[in-house]
Every structure is written in C-alpha cells, then in structure tokens.
Image (cartoon, rainbow, N blue to C red):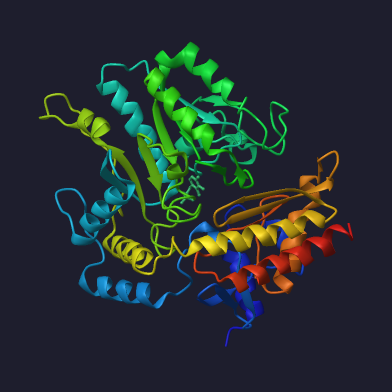
C-alpha cells in the first residue's frame, strides 16, 4: 500500500501547484494536505482528521461537500450524455439553466453565453463589449476601466483588467493597457476619509475620467461590493449606484464580475441587487455548480445581443467558443443547485447566519493585532496588522497569515489566507454553531500567532 509520505513525495515530484512557491515544502514539515473526502461543511484528510471548511474549498462550494442530491444528478446525467457540442446542437440542461438564470436576474437580462470558469466568463465579457462598440460603428470606444487592486482572473485578458501586482507586474508587456481608478478601500481610504462617514470621494476619479475620455471608453468592469482577491475589501453599494448612473450618462457599458459573489454569497442571489441596479453584462462562475464542476456564464441583454444579429452580410457573429462550453453534466448540476436553493430556501435561511457571523466577528476587535474587520453576507475578513494605531502591516515575508492558517489547521479549520487577511467564506449550509466553532478556532490561532511574534 502507498503510504501518506509516498503520496506526498509523488505529489511534489509531479504536481506543480497553483499560486504556490514549491520550494517552501523543501526540508519543511509543512506539506500539502491530502484531502480524501468531504461531507457538508467538513473535509477529511488521508489520516481521517476533520477540518471545518472556512473558505468553501476555493470560494466555490455552497451546498456542502459531496451533497447527496447533487451526486445523484451527476450520476443520472453522466449516464445519459457527458458532452454535447453547443454549436448547431443543444441540450435540455443548457436550456433549462439559461432560462433559470435569466429569470433570476430579471429584466432586462435575456441571453446567456456559456464558458468554463471565471476567467473565461470575463474574457467573453471583454470581447463582447469590444465587438459591440465595433459593430455599433464606434470602434474608437475600445478602452476598459477597472479598479486598482482588482482581480478578474488569471488569463491574459482578465489579467489586463486586473490590478494586483503579484498577478500582473511581470506580464505587463503582454497585456493590453487599461485605465485605472482608485479602489474604494475603506480601511486605508485613498482620500483619507473616516470609515463609514464618507461621501464616496473616491468616486470623483471615475467622474473625472469618464468626463474627459468617455468617447474612447468601451466599459468599466468591477467586482461588486467586495474586492475579493485584494483581501475581501468591502465597499458601499452606493458606489455601484453612482457608477450605473455615470455609465448611462456617458454611454459606457457596465460589466459586473459576479464570479465570486453570485448565488447567495452576499446574502442575495446577485450582489448588484444590493445597489438596486442592473449591469449591461455580468459574469458568474464560482457558485454556479455549488462547487462541483467548472462552468461559467456571461449574461447580457438584448441591447448587446442585437448588435451581433445579422444575415451574414456584415460578419457580426461572435466567434468565441470553448470545447466544454455549456457542458451537460455541469449544466445539470447547476440546474439542481438552483432548484435546491429555491426549495430549501437557502437565501432566506441565511439571515440568522449572517447575523451570527457579524456577532462572532465583533469579538476579534479585542485582539491586539486586528486592524480591520470586514463583513457582508456570508463573508467575514480580518486584516492583521503589526500596529493597530499606525495600521503598519506585517511584511509579506513574515507570512503572518500563513502561520495563522497552519495553527488553525492543527485545530481543525481550513482558513487559507490572502497575505495578512484571514477570511471566512464558508459553504452557505454552515450552521450557526459551526460559525461559532470556525471563528473561535480563527480567534485562538490569531491570538497565539500574533502575540508570539
Ligand atoms: C475567482 C475569480 C475570477 C476567476 O475565476 P476562475 O474560475 O478562477 O478562472 C474572476 N473574477 C473574480 C471576481 C474572481 O473572484
């Protein structure tokens, strides 16, 4: 029998892990954890150790691991058909899912374009917006605006609109240029406003930019309400409301990257609902199959769609399609996911959990090295700082978040951090007791690590 040590040795011999400095495992007792199974909010490793999943695997799981209802649909669909090409052919799960998504999003949404993951959904949105203006006879509207510290995926188009150095800096010569506006990062406000008492002064930058350059701008892309990969930076819904109005004023498309936020994460199906706006194009991926299989969708309106509709005379076709576009197994699971969300009132039942998470987060305030506490819906984040008064951060090389993560693993919680930010983004089916347990492990881990360092 292959032992755990042999599995790990083989892993490190053959697997190049994502977002990972592989040398950290050399000569260290820290190794990748081999997960063997999951049930509900829990994961179990090869030794049978249990971990409460604090970050929904990688922000994808919503209805718990190895969900019996979803497992059943997966088997049933696999026995019928595993793949259908989506050009000149179609299948019931793709049709059902598109109808459900359009109805959930409400008017004016009318069309669903499938792809494989968050990055491709963003690529589709960018190309759609670009080709839209080209075909509307305004090819000069070709620039994209996004926020500093934004994250929209790891493929080159999505990196272009991204703004986080570690993902982008090296590739700057390869990506297309974009226009940047400062992110609404309330804890370290770019305009030095007092948290919670601002008039969204940072938005003035967008106003200035649109006013001077709107004739060349195709679209602005945003992560709605939360800049996730930047460290779960929550910003006011009012920002999105203002942005929608400004986009209308200057005839600029609004692309809403809901990849991490859709399907209940913020307490509503879509984050744009908090701002009571509708974007022109929005992208969904992470929660769409409840974490089962890669699938994504870029959803838009007739206004966009009609600009691509012609009789071949003008070559308006949208030439974009991935091999696995609208995969039937993935679509069938997504349909079941949405059915369960509706039948089991997943969103409605979130309210007491959201309240519990908020309460549990408040306790972190007493810790000496907790700088900021952020919360929206089923997301909570703790920014750890060296000095609470000056907000001086720990250095990247101090790996403080990583130390907290390792300490929490020892105590049965998976809390893989973003730099110095420890965050909670649990499956939506987590109970209030489990929220208490998860946050308590995190509290103790932060206390142990920071008061020692
Ligand atoms: C994760 C993420 C993406 C990229 O999705 P992948 O499935 O990893 O390609 C895009 N946008 C946002 C906001 C994300 O959080």
The residue lying at 26 percent from left, 16 percent from top is 137
Counting from the top left corner in percent of width and height, residue 215 is at 40, 13
> Which residue is the extreme one toward the top?
212
Tell me the quadrant of the picture where the N terminus can be found: bottom right
> Which residue is the extreme one toward the right?
452
Counting from the top left corner in percent of width and height, residue 66 is at 45, 75
State the image quarter where residue 139 is shown.
Answer: top left
Counting from the top left corner in percent of width and height, residue 242 is at 49, 28
In front: 411, or 233? 233
Side of 352 relative to 72 (left or right): right
In front: 4, or 290? 290
- Taking 223 as reference, is 417 above or below it? below
The residue lying at 27 percent from left, 50 percent from top is 103
- Taking 110 as reference, is 197 above or below it? above
Side of 325 relative to 399 (left or right): left
State the image quarter where residue 26 is shown.
Answer: bottom right
The total number of labels drawn is 0
Answer whether residue 426 is visible to the viewer in this image: no
In front: 195, or 328? 195
Counting from the top left corner in percent of width and height, residue 156 is at 48, 37
In front: 233, or 106? 106
Side of 230 relative to 56 (left or right): right
Answer whether residue 287 is visible to the viewer in this image: yes
The residue lying at 43 percent from left, 38 percent from top is 256
> Which residue is the extreme one toward the bottom?
1
Tell me the quadrant of the picture where the C terminus can be found: bottom right
- Taking 385 as reference, is 3 above or below it? below
């Amino acid at each position: 029998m292959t032992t755990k040590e042999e599995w790990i040795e083989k892993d490190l011999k053959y697997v190049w892990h994502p977002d990972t400095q592989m040398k950290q495992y050399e000569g260290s007792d820290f190794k990748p954890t081999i997960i063997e199974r999951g049930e509900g909010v829990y994961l179990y490793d090869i030794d049978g150790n249990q971990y409460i999943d604090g970050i929904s695997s990688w922000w994808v799981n919503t209805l718990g691991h190895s969900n019996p209802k979803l497992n059943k649909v997966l088997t049933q669909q696999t026995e019928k058909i595993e793949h259908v090409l989506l050009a000149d052919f179609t299948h019931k799960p793709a049709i059902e899912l598109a109808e459900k998504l359009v109805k959930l999003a409400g008017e004016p949404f009318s069309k669903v374009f499938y792809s494989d993951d968050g990055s491709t959904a963003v690529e589709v949105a960018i190309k759609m917006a670009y080709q839209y203006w080209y075909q509307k006879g305004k090819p000069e509207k070709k620039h994209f605006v996004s926020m500093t510290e934004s994250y929209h995926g790891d493929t080159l188009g999505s990196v272009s609109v991204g703004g986080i150095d570690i993902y982008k800096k090296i590739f700057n010569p390869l990506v297309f240029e974009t226009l940047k506006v400062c992110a609404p990062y309330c804890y370290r406000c770019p305009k030095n406003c007092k948290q919670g008492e601002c008039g969204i002064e940072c938005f003035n930058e967008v106003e200035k930019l649109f006013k001077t350059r709107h004739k060349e701008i195709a679209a602005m892309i945003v992560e709605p309400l939360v800049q996730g990969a930047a460290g779960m930076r929550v910003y006011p819904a009012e920002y999105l409301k203002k942005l929608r109005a400004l986009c209308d004023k200057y005839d600029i498309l609004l692309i809403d990257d809901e990849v991490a936020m859709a399907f209940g994460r913020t307490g509503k199906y879509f984050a744009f609902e908090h701002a009571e706006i509708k974007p022109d194009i929005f992208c969904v991926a992470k929660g769409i199959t409840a974490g089962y299989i890669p699938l994504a969708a870029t959803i838009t309106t007739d206004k966009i769609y009609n600009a691509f509709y012609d009789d071949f005379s003008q070559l308006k076709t949208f030439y974009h399609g991935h091999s696995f576009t609208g995969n039937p197994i993935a679509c069938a699971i997504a349909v079941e996911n949405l059915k369960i969300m509706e039948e089991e009132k997943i969103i409605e039942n979130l309210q007491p959990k959201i309240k519990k998470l908020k309460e549990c987060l408040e306790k972190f305030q007493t810790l000496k090295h907790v700088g900021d506490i952020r919360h929206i819906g089923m997301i909570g984040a703790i920014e750890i700082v060296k000095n609470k008064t000056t907000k001086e951060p720990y250095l990247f090389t101090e790996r403080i978040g990583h130390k907290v993560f390792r300490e929490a693993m020892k105590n049965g919680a998976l809390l893989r951090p973003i730099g110095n930010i420890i965050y909670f983004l649990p499956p939506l089916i987590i109970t209030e007791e489990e929220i208490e347990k998860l946050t308590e492990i995190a509290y103790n881990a932060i206390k142990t690590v920071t008061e020692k360092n």
